[in-house]
Image (tube, helix red, strand yellow):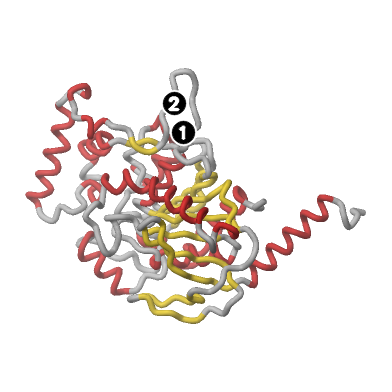
């Protein structure tokens, strides 16, 4: 029999207390500013959550509630192109109920209010913005005492996948995008022709992709060949490829991955969990999720959602938002009938379990 002071007994008692606290936790929400970046904080609280209207969304949170005591692990969530925090609230709330504090930055120039930097310009900025958020929380009077920041989790959805893969150590360059779309524009057309509204615009883009094929790499401009994301290996040995060593686990949902080099994906060492959608019409799995899993030995598939399209991993998703997105970006899309939202819920549970496995317990 274990004594009351045995280390294993104490550890088990501590874990049971943590689980009981998480099970009874409500979901709090408050705004935060990380050096000019708006951040939505979602976290466990003991205060009662009530229905709140946020634009077309209705969610149940305790606004500006006090976070629960103790040190919690942090998950930073990176939204997709033109995205917002609320569209991914179901996952954020699940993480909060499990005891995590979730930070959802609104990426500069690539969010639902402002899309002037959408694409590679945003891809370059996003990993640094995540680091900026972590640094700001570490200095904040409310959050610094409630967070254990030696190990941080990151979740990325769609273009947020670039954020997560880069923070895990993957490297991409604009030339990879050009070459991918030169070879596969028709098969991965939503990605390669996003923003091209008519036949002439698509033809112009296709011609630009083809020009990259005709010029030797040594003569290409630096902005095409420059590496972005993780750290490059040294000449003597492979260094830790992560640009921020605090990032210890990464989860991804329908990630944008085709622009990353296979060799950099093979260098990733921290655990990366991937949720894919079998009928993803925006980022075709064979070029993105499956490509990532082929080359990244530290990556595992958490779920492959049958019948799911790209945005089915998000919730809440009011009809008005879905219709607007379809009109603006996917005019030919026919909604997938009968997708079972319980599959999304189960995938979210696996994401929560994945981060619990690799981040908990906090010190």
Q: Is mark 2 on a helix, strand or loop?
A: loop
Point out the tag, 1 or 2, that comes first from the N-terminus.
2
Which residue is depicted at the point 38% across and 38% down? 229
Question: Residue 76 vs residue 200: left or right?
Answer: right
Which residue is depicted at the point 74% across and 62% down? 16
> Measured from the top left, where is residue 61 in percent x and y?
49, 75
Q: Between residues 307 and 157, which one lies in front from this camera angle?
A: 157
Instruction: Report crowding for label 1: few under 14, some 14 to 19, many 20 or more residues within 10 A (C-alpha).
Output: many
Q: Decide: is 356 above or below 175.
A: below
Rendering quarter of residue 182 = top left
In this figure, which residue is indicated by the disc labeled 1? Answer: 241
Residues at marks 1 and 2, CA–CA distance in whole angstroms: 7 Å
Q: Between residues 106 and 95, which one lies in front from this camera angle?
A: 106
Which residue is depicted at the point 44% across and 26% down? 233
Q: Is mark 1 on a helix, strand or loop?
A: loop
In this figure, which residue is indicated by the disc labeled 2? Answer: 233
Residue furthest left in the image: 200
> Measured from the top left, where is residue 13 in percent x and y?
78, 60
Q: In which quarter of the image is the N terminus?
A: bottom right
Contact check, label 1 and label 2, Cβ < 8 Å: yes
Report the disc number at residue 20: none
């Amino acid at each position: 029999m274990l004594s009351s002071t045995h280390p294993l007994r104490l550890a088990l008692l501590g874990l049971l207390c943590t689980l009981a606290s998480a099970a009874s936790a409500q979901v709090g929400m408050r705004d935060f500013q990380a050096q000019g970046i708006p951040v939505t904080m979602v976290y466990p609280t003991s205060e009662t959550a009530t229905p709140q209207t946020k634009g077309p969304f209705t969610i149940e949170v305790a606004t500006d509630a006090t976070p629960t005591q103790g040190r919690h692990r942090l998950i930073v969530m990176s939204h997709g192109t033109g995205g917002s925090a609320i569209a991914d609230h179901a996952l954020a709330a699940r993480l909060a109920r499990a005891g995590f504090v979730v930070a959802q930055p609104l990426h500069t120039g690539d969010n639902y209010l402002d899309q002037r930097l959408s694409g590679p310009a945003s891809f370059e900025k996003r990993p640094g913005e995540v680091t900026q958020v972590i640094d700001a929380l570490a200095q904040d009077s409310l959050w610094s005492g409630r967070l254990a920041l030696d190990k941080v989790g990151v979740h990325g959805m769609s273009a947020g996948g670039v954020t997560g893969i880069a923070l895990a150590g993957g490297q991409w360059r604009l030339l990879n995008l050009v070459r991918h779309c030169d070879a596969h524009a028709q098969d991965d057309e939503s990605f390669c022709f996003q923003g091209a509204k008519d036949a002439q615009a698509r033809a112009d883009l296709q011609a630009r992709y083809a020009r990259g094929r005709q010029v030797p790499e040594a003569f290409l401009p630096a902005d095409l060949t420059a590496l972005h994301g993780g750290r490059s290996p040294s000449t003597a040995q492979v260094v830790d490829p992560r640009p921020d060593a605090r990032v210890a686990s990464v989860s991804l949902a329908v990630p944008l991955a085709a622009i990353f080099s296979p060799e950099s994906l093979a260098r990733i060492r921290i655990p990366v969990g991937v949720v894919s959608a079998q009928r993803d019409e925006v980022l075709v799995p064979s070029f993105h999720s499956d490509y990532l899993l082929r080359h990244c030995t530290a990556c595992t598939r958490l779920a492959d959602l049958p019948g799911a399209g790209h945005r089915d991993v998000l919730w809440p998703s009011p009809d008005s938002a879905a219709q607007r997105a379809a009109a603006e970006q996917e005019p030919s899309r026919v909604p997938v009938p009968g997708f079972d939202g319980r599959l999304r819920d189960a995938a979210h549970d696996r994401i929560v379990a994945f981060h619990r496995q690799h981040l908990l317990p906090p010190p």
